[in-house]
Image (tube, coloured by chain):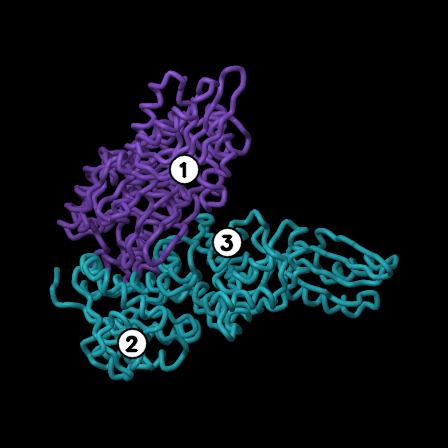
Chain colours: A cyan, B purple
């Protein structure tokens, strides 16, 4: 074994960074044996240097992250500060000064993955980011390497633990959104400002990353259709139950049936209770991957948290260190397929639509005519009425989002339709 | 991209080999883009050369596998013939003549993994075998690479599809073992001679491979305790249901609580219905991995079949070809921890024991005394009696297999105990 240690610079020492540092110290012998050389924490860049950090010698701590990545003797920079800047500049600077990079930064990878990969490539360095998607769950490596000989057709997953906790709570207790969110906040599953989670921004970043790797195509964050889950109601869960379904916030990356384009989207959807994703509880994540040869694979585990995310970071760190010792780099960006990324209108799925309608004869015929005129075929209709008010629940066969949108627009114009109470996609059947 | 193709020799062209050849042909462009060079099927060694194989030019077919691996221009040998010989000699010869190897051969890897790794290492070649465990499910790579910075404590999995199909059928229909086996045979899930599956040999080989990688320790096939599932009865399933459990044939690789030794075993066990492994249906496989930092991860998918296994083989083929192009090799055997592998007596778990006893006062006291004398603590006892016959169902707290064995031996000597109807371990709680 080589005795000269590989030097690691840690950018950020919060929940994840402190776990990375802790494991690097407590498992130093194991890491050395697995890498073939010792690894040494050479510097830790933080915002608040005065904070006491157990196990981290004070002389390693600095507030000057730029100087740290420019030192020139750093082998691997571990970036766990998150956000776009200064993370982006620091990573680019790290490559320029000879370091490889392990990052857990989903927002940055989703927005600027192509440029960062190009910078890594230009300097002959590695950019690894298993921790950016679904915490400890190995997803990037299986998609990029294990399935490298297969053709992935769909990635369907629960990739945000906060929203899964909230939806699971609503499902199991009948609570409304706000009540479930409050509990998630109290238990530390939701941040004070939960926007990134509940509006689907976090999941959309992960969807962009997964779609890019799965389809060997650049998928930008802007390419991902995004709909949050703040408008999911207890009534929606009641409707889902009647269908033998539950509701999950899903990230869905799909190859079109003709194989010539792909889509990526995040939105709440009904999925059958018999689908393995339906039983993913609490803050856990799970991702289904459907491929030509392998069929359906599922990956399940904790999607966030300091230790699980650190586990993913350290797996990457070992791989990058091994590459460094053998003078090579791992697989970089693979975007050769360059498939067009279509918008939401091209997505084909099924829909569950609740309408408030006048309780009088002929309404169903009117509504059915509108669906037919837009080429949306109806699977089932359920009609409930009392006191002059009635509701119609329509479940369609597969139709494009554009066709469904046109249908709903026309339904709203009918005198007999008082309102569209909810529209929910039905997935995983 | 390099234009000179990498040459692949395929050993075996059965269910898996023919799928490997098919995908190599139909997805040639994708494989070339992902590898960075085209891959070419340079020869196919078979036993029956006269059989027509769609898509495989007859001039590639040979019965002389040894000559094929000795050609000297072969970059990668894909071994999908199975069994110990001639597979072992062919793989060793391949290394000697400059080729890396991708194998799906669990029996060989479990028996001779260390020697094969040493041969690969000696010649600076790769030995990859993702397909040897759980078909298409990425397990070897996640354990060896994604979790390289973590400490794995337990691997708990359903790694044999045939037996899971049979047990699932017994559970859902109340069928007996023979009836369920007959259906599995009729549907092609069980082979004419099902011994390797139902007696747990296949699962034991996989357990040896998984334990070795998970614990960085050589685990030989002989180190794995093995108990088949041919004696599981409908009555056992009824008992399991009363416990809120089902029965699965599990491969369990565990680090002892003090961390100083490991065990590996295969046997039927009760697991709670709430455990994710309980809902793994039909011929699917799933493996739970518990680690210090990552917590619980689960990997799920088709555990066998031509196309899924070929997917795993091709993922390895891409990785090995990339390594070859960059003049490096991937991670080899990691056995530095060299932990002692303990026998079954050291395993600590819970037990469900059904006793046929005389229906008279004092029996329970006698039985309870025997448990106490052997240091096995009782969790619950259920007593049922009629017509002078009675049964006692005892569920224990955690105890070593050795202590339980001593208990059962002593119970058999009691006049009031007419027989030990069944002993089943309880896992996954």
Task: Kindly identify the residue that appears in the image at 46 percent across and 72 percent down.
Answer: A220
Between label 2 and label 3, give the one nearer the viewer.
2
- Taking the image as shown, residue B114 lies to the left or right of residue B310, namely left
* In this view, A354 is above or below A64: above
Question: x and y percent of residue A99 in the render?
Answer: 24, 74
The residue indicated by pointer 1 is B426
Tag count: 3
The residue indicated by pointer 2 is A52
Q: Are marks 1 and 3 on the same chain?
A: no
Q: Disc 3: which chain?
A: A
Task: Kindly identify the residue that appears in the image at 34 percent across and 30 percent down.
Answer: B227
Q: Give whichever of discs 2 and 3 has the lower sequence position.
A: 2
Give the number of the disc on residue A280.
Answer: 3
Rate crowding at label 2 as few (under 14), some (14 to 19) or many (20 or more) other CA atoms within 10 Å. few
Task: Kindly identify the residue that appears in the image at 43 percent across and 69 percent down.
Answer: A218
In this view, the residue farthest toward the right is A361
Q: Are marks 2 and 1 on the same chain?
A: no
Query: What is the spatial separation of the Cα atoms under label 1 and label 3, in whole angstroms?
Result: 23 Å
Query: What is the spatial separation of the Cα atoms under label 2 and label 1, in whole angstroms?
Result: 45 Å
Query: What is the spatial separation of the Cα atoms under label 2 and label 3, in whole angstroms?
Result: 37 Å
Question: x and y percent of residue A360 in the render?
Answer: 87, 59
- Taking the image as shown, residue A344 lies to the left or right of residue A43, namely right
Name the secondary structure under disc 3. loop
* In this view, B305 is above or below A48: above
């Amino acid at each position: 074994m080589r005795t000269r240690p590989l030097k690691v610079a840690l950018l950020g020492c919060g929940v994840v960074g402190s776990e990375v540092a802790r494991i690097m110290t407590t498992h130093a012998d194991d890491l050395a044996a697995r890498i073939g050389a010792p690894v040494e924490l050479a510097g830790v860049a933080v915002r608040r240097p005065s904070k006491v950090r157990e196990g981290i010698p004070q002389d390693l701590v600095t507030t000057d992250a730029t100087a740290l990545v420019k030192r020139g003797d750093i082998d691997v920079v571990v970036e766990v500060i998150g956000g776009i800047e200064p993370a982006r500049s620091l990573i680019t600077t790290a490559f320029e000064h000879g370091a490889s990079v392990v990052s857990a930064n989903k927002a940055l990878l989703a927005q600027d993955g192509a440029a960062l990969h190009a910078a890594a490539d230009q300097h002959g360095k590695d950019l690894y980011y298993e921790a950016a998607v679904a915490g400890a769950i190995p997803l990037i490596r299986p998609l990029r390497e294990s399935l490298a000989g297969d053709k992935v057709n769909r990635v369907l997953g629960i990739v945000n633990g906060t929203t899964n906790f909230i939806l699971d709570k609503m499902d199991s207790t009948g609570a409304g959104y706000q009540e479930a969110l409050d509990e998630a906040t109290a238990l530390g599953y939701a941040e004070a400002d939960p926007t990134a989670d509940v509006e689907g921004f976090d999941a959309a970043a992960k969807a962009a990353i997964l779609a890019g790797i799965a389809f060997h195509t650049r998928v930008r964050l802007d390419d991902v259709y995004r709909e949050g889950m703040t408008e999911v109601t207890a009534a929606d869960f009641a409707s889902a139950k009647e269908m033998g379904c539950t509701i999950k916030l899903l990230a869905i990356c799909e190859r079109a049936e003709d194989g010539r384009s792909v889509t990526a989207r995040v939105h709440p959807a009904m999925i059958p209770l018999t689908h393995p994703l339906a039983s993913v509880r609490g803050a856990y994540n799970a991702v289904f991957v459907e491929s030509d040869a392998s069929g359906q694979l599922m990956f399940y585990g904790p999607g966030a948290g300091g230790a699980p995310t650190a586990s993913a970071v350290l797996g990457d760190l070992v791989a990058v260190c091994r590459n460094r010792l053998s003078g090579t780099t791992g697989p970089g960006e693979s975007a050769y397929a360059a498939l067009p990324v279509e918008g939401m209108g091209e997505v084909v799925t099924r829909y569950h639509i609740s309408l408030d309608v006048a309780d009088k004869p002929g309404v169903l015929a009117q509504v059915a005519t509108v669906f037919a005129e837009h080429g949306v075929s109806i699977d089932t209709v359920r009609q409930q009425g009392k006191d002059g008010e009635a509701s119609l629940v329509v479940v369609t066969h597969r139709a494009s989002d554009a066709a469904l949108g046109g249908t709903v627009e026309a339904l709203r114009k009918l005198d007999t339709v008082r309102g569209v109470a909810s529209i929910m996609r039905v997935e995983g059947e």
